[in-house]
Amino acid sequence: MVRRRGSGVILDFDQAAWAHLAKALGAHVRWARTQAIAVPDDVLKLADLASRSASDRQDPSKLTGWSALTPDGSMDSQLIDYSGAARELDVSKSTVERLVADGDLPSVRIRGARRIRTDDLAAYTAELA
């Protein structure tokens, strides 16, 4: 179910719907990249949210950071884990770990967890082109 709340939207899907949405958006993003079609950042963030919601079995309303908006209404830079970065790059998690270890992809430590800024991931992919 999709509900409007103020200027935002609440996505209230069951687990099967999140899994279907994650698979469909992931396939679309991969196809767009093979066709050299730019995928809007908000679509990438929605694909990652759907994937995390489906795989982590979390209520997406409890995922912190994904609804953070800047004053102009755009999404602020976010942090993703190595699995999320691997999905974005269409590589394995161990490849992301090597990129971080080699210093090619910056990461930050939050308590005991390593995260990658979405801005750093975008900068890395821009350098590949």
Image: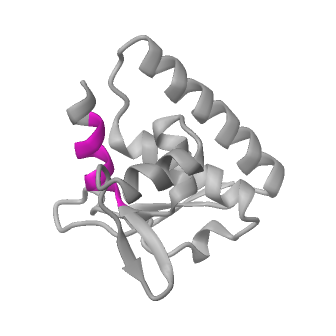
Depicted 44 relative to depicted 74: above or below: above
- In the picture as drawn, the residue positioned furthest to the top comes out as 35
Judging depth in this view, the residue of 116 and 48 nearest the camera is 116
Judging depth in this view, the residue of 39 and 80 nearest the camera is 80
Depicted 80 relative to depicted 48: above or below: below
Depicted 19 relative to depicted 79: above or below: above
The residue depicted at 25 percent of the width and 56 percent of the height is 74
Q: Is residue 123 magenta?
A: yes
- In the picture as drawn, the residue positioned furthest to the front comes out as 102
Residue 127 location, quadrant: top left
Instruction: Return the x and y of residue 3 as percentages of the image width and height.
Output: 58, 59
Q: Is residue 116 left or right of residue 31?
A: left
The residue depicted at 32 percent of the width and 25 percent of the height is 38
- In the picture as drawn, the residue positioned furthest to the bottom comes out as 111
* Stretch in magenta: 117-125
- Asked if one can make out residue 66 in the rendered structure from this viewpoint, the answer is yes
- Asked if one can make out residue 46 in the rendered structure from this viewpoint, the answer is no
Instruction: Return the x and y of residue 98 as percentages of the image width and height.
Output: 46, 51
Quadrant containing the C terminus in the rendered view:
top left
The residue depicted at 59 percent of the width and 34 percent of the height is 26
Q: Is residue 98 left or right of residue 77?
A: right
Instruction: Return the x and y of residue 13 as percentages of the image width and height.
Output: 72, 56
- In the picture as drawn, the residue positioned furthest to the right comes out as 16
The residue depicted at 44 percent of the width and 42 percent of the height is 44
Quadrant containing the N terminus in the rendered view:
bottom right
Q: Report the magenta stretch's main SS.
A: helix
Figure label count: 0
Instruction: Return the x and y of residue 62 as percentages of the image width and height.
Output: 59, 77
Q: Is residue 4 magenta?
A: no
